[in-house]
Structures are given as C-alpha cells and as structure tokens.
Amino acid sequence: MSRLIEIGGTRVLLFASTGPLLASPGDSNDFIGEAWSVSADLLAIPMERLGPDVLNLRTRVGGEIFQKFANYRLRCAIVGDISAALEGSGALRDFVRETNDGPALWFVPDVDQLRARLETETAA
C-alpha cells in the first residue's frame, strides 16, 4: 500500500515494495494517476517495482518513463540498492551521477537518504 508523507514541504508518495511493476512507459500512467490523486510532488519508487529493462539504458525504457514523469512535473526517486545494475554499466553510473545532481530524478539507497536530501534542499 502506498502512503503519502511530507518531508520539508514536499509531498512524497512512497510506493509499496510489492505491486505492479513499472516496466514500460505505459505503466507510468498508473504511477502518475496515483500521485495526482493525492497531490504528490515526488514519487518514491522502490527498486523492487522496476521492470528488468528500466535500468538498462540500451532499451531506452527508463529514459522514456523518467521523461514522462518530468513532462507531468513529477519528481521521482528510485529507492533501493542498484549496485548490481551499476556494476555492469559505466553509462548507467554516469546517468545516476548526473541525475542525482539535478532536481527531477534521484537514486537513493533508502528512505532516510531521501529524507536527508529533501531536508537539505529545503534548508538551502
């Protein structure tokens, strides 16, 4: 079950670790709809909910999904351990580093790290 929390003035929709996968750009509609239904600003999606091709940059699936979130002005945080995916792809490591420096998409190891980022952002 997803739950809405507020961190530093940001309404964060924490998705449950179980549920339908975010595996294609079409799947993102369900995540966007749920976020809109509670007026969330940021989607916190557990790594377990990502389909197998989302972090494979060659498929471009992740790029299409994350762009769709950005088009709808929804920020996104992928929450969990992505080290296995990072090991096999220098391009993914670069992508994660670049997105973590921006405001729209973050990869964080856990909700505590997300909380710290949002609180730091608010304090700045």
Image: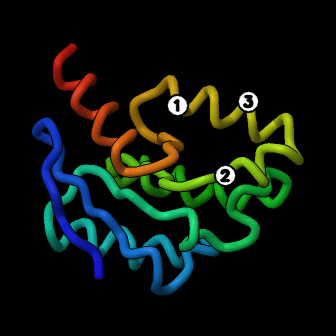
Residue 4 location (% of width, % of height) = 18, 64
Q: Amino acid at mark 2?
A: Ile
Q: Quadrant of the C terminus?
A: top left
Query: Which mark sits nearer the N-terminus, 3 or 2?
Result: 2
Asked if labels 1 and 2 touch by Cβ distance under 8 angstroms, the answer is no
Q: Amino acid at mark 1?
A: Asn
The residue that mark 1 highlights is 100
User: What is the crowding at mark 1: few (fewer than 14 residues within 10 Å), some, or many (at least 20)?
Assistant: some
Q: Amino acid at mark 3?
A: Asp
Residue 87 location (% of width, % of height) = 84, 44
The residue that mark 3 highlights is 94
The residue that mark 2 highlights is 82
Residue placed at 65% from the left, 57% from the top? 62
Does residue 87 appear to the left or right of 67 in the view shown?
right
Does residue 24 appear to the left or right of 4 in the view shown?
right
Does residue 103 appear to the left or right of 85 in the view shown?
left
Residue placed at 33% from the left, 51% from the top? 74
Query: Which mark sits nearer the N-terminus, 2 or 1?
Result: 2
Residue 111 location (% of width, % of height) = 36, 50
